[in-house]
Image (cartoon, rainbow, N blue to C red):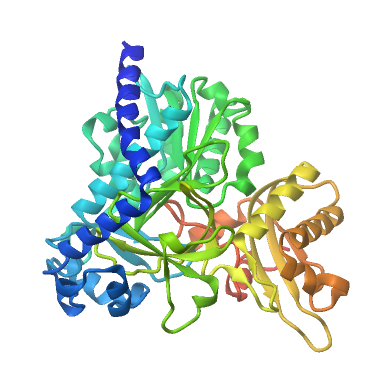
């Protein structure tokens, strides 16, 4: 019976590959039709009337009329939607709002999740991801009697001022609204899955889930690591495969997986274990890995999101000019700009990406527009530091849990530099060698950093501070950012985060 159920899912996923093939082969036609539908749908909304959507017929007109905007431009409209107003940014009344966690900023963003966005973006993209996963792995067996999947989601709460509106992590909203057949496949009950207290949730999951036959796990690596540690501690097993022998897949997203890869190899030592990277944000489920042999994730073009891209030289301009999908170039950093079936129009989420292929369109996440270090013209991005750290870990047999980087500014006659705070799972035998290798690897990946480091002309060798284990988790907890899709800021062009962490530790490093 289990084989029959799994085969039924396989056949269904195979049928869905036709939809994926269409936007792979005809990306511009699919996006053009989507653009027309979005503009037509929003004509009678308050936003559509303000910007004259009724007379917009081309993307060029749309760009001229509607500026690229950040959350602040939408916030007054969204606040009214939370209180129950309808036909504001998108037709109808919106019941669900995703709390965008980002990094550690105190101010939360609330992203509307319309019925169309939930069904045709987030849930459809889940089907896309699973279809590609099965297409690449013919022997995969994630469904059937007794087989369960474990998702590390967030929580949902009623909105202040209007309990009919619900606010939560996008993972929790998706779990709540998935078809009933999906709920029956969860390794935990919905009450456990949506618990707001992450520590209590991990405690309960670590008691329940080891008794189940788990085939797939999904979640942000930071919190999956915490769960894995707890499970191994309770079960006394040496790795996760001893707990779940049939575990085949880890679906991960939220942060770059490069710094975590070695750590997960110890948790999941099977050589044929499957990893699938996904790009699922509060604003939309944008992409997923479609080919394990290719770098990058396939950009989903039929899920209600119209894409534009902001070149790096436009990021800090008052009126930046975005380019269309047909204009992008390989190897260049872009900030993603989206118009969506949730009522976000030419919205700048803050993520930066790079195209690894244009046939089909594949992307990789390189960081965020506010997560970089460029205090001295070095233009270091998260992609650079993730890759340099991953290579250094491989060279030294080291495993890193988390890290963050900030500039060290010029003082008196001294030069500037970068300060790294790193938390190790397995520390290097020689910290001096690790430090030197990390600096050299970063130079090899970033020519601007290399130029500033040559002869210590403008930058000194990076400073490395080792933090006690669980520092980042405890710091996030102290800021009310524990769990869900909350993430440690990898880079900052200021010292706020690093100084906060050092103060939090009280001089222990």
Displayed quadrant of residue 168:
bottom left
Left or right: 120, with 126 as reference point:
left
Residue 36: percent from the left, percent from the top?
A: 22, 61
Can residue 144 be seen in the rendering of this structure?
no
Residue 116: percent from the left, percent from the top?
A: 21, 52
Displayed quadrant of residue 127:
top left
Left or right: 236, with 196 as reference point:
right
Displayed quadrant of residue 481:
bottom left
Q: Quadrant of the C terminus?
A: bottom right
> Which one is nearer the viewer's eye here, 172 or 449?
449
Residue projecting furthest to the bottom: 412
Q: Residue at x 41, y 60 (%)?
A: 325
> Is 224 situated above or below 366?
above
> Which one is nearer the viewer's eye here, 353 or 230?
353
Q: Residue at x 39, y 38 (%)?
A: 129
Can residue 291 be seen in the rendering of this structure?
yes
Q: How many marks?
A: 0
> Is 379 situated above or below 116?
below
Residue 117: percent from the left, percent from the top?
A: 25, 53
Q: Residue at x 49, y 46 (%)?
A: 297
Q: Quadrant of the N terminus?
A: top left
> Which one is nearer the viewer's eye here, 457 or 495?
457
Residue 87: percent from the left, percent from the top?
A: 12, 67
Q: Residue at x 50, y 23 (%)?
A: 244
> Which one is nearer the viewer's eye here, 4 or 17?
17
Left or right: 199, with 183 as reference point:
right
Residue projecting furthest to the right: 455
> Is 206 situated above or below 11?
below
């Amino acid at each position: 019976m289990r084989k029959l159920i799994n085969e039924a899912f396989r056949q269904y996923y195979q049928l869905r590959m036709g939809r994926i093939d269409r936007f792979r082969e005809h990306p511009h036609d699919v996006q053009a039709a989507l653009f027309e539908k979005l503009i037509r749908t929003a004509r009678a909304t308050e936003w559509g009337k303000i910007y004259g959507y009724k007379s917009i017929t081309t993307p060029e007109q749309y760009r001229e009329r509607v500026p690229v905007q950040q959350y602040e431009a939408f916030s007054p409209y969204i606040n009214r939607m939370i209180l129950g107003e309808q036909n504001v940014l998108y037709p109808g009344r919106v019941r669900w709002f995703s709390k965008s966690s980002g990094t550690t900023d105190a101010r939360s963003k609330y992203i509307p999740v319309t019925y169309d966005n939930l069904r045709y973006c987030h849930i459809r993209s889940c089907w896309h991801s699973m279809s590609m996963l099965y297409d690449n792995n013919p022997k995969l067996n994630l469904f059937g009697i007794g087989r369960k999947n474990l998702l590390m989601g967030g929580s949902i709460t009623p909105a202040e001022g209007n309990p009919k509106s619900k606010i939560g992590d996008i993972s929790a909203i998706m779990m709540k609204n998935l078809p009933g057949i999906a709920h029956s496949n969860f390794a935990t009950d919905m009450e456990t899955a949506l618990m707001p207290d992450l520590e209590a949730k991990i405690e309960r999951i670590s008691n329940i889930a080891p008794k189940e036959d788990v085939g797939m796990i999904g979640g942000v690596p930071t919190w999956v690591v915490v769960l894995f540690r707890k499970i191994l501690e309770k079960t006394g097993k040496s790795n996760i495969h001893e707990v779940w022998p049939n575990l085949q897949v880890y679906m991960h997203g939220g942060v770059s997986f490069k710094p975590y890869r070695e750590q997960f190899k110890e948790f999941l030592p099977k050589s044929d274990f499957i990893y699938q990277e996904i790009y699922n944000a509060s604003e939309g489920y944008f992409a997923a890995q479609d080919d394990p042999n290719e770098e990058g994730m396939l950009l989903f073009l039929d899920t209600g999101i119209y894409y534009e891209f902001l070149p790096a030289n436009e990021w800090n301009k008052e009126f930046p000019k975005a380019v269309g999908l047909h204009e992008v170039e390989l190897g260049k950093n872009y900030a993603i700009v989206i118009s969506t079936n949730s009522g976000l129009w030419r919205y700048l989420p803050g993520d930066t990406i790079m195209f690894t292929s244009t046939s089909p369109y594949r992307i990789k996440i390189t960081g965020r527009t506010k997560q970089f270090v460029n205090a001295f013209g070095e233009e270091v991005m998260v992609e650079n530091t993730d890759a340099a750290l991953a290579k250094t870990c491989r060279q030294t047999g080291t495993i890193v849990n988390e890290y963050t980087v900030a500039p060290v500014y010029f003082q008196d006659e001294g030069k500037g530099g970068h300060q790294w705070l790193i938390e190790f799972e397995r520390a290097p035998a020689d910290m001096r060698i690790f430090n030197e290798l990390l600096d050299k690897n970063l130079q090899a990946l970033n020519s601007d950093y290399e130029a500033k480091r040559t002869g210590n002309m403008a930058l000194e060798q990076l400073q490395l501070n080792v933090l006690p284990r669980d520092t980042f988790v405890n710091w996030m907890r102290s800021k009310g950012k524990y769990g869900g899709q909350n993430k440690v800021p990898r880079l900052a062009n200021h010292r706020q985060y690093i100084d906060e962490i050092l103060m939090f530790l009280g001089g222990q490093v």
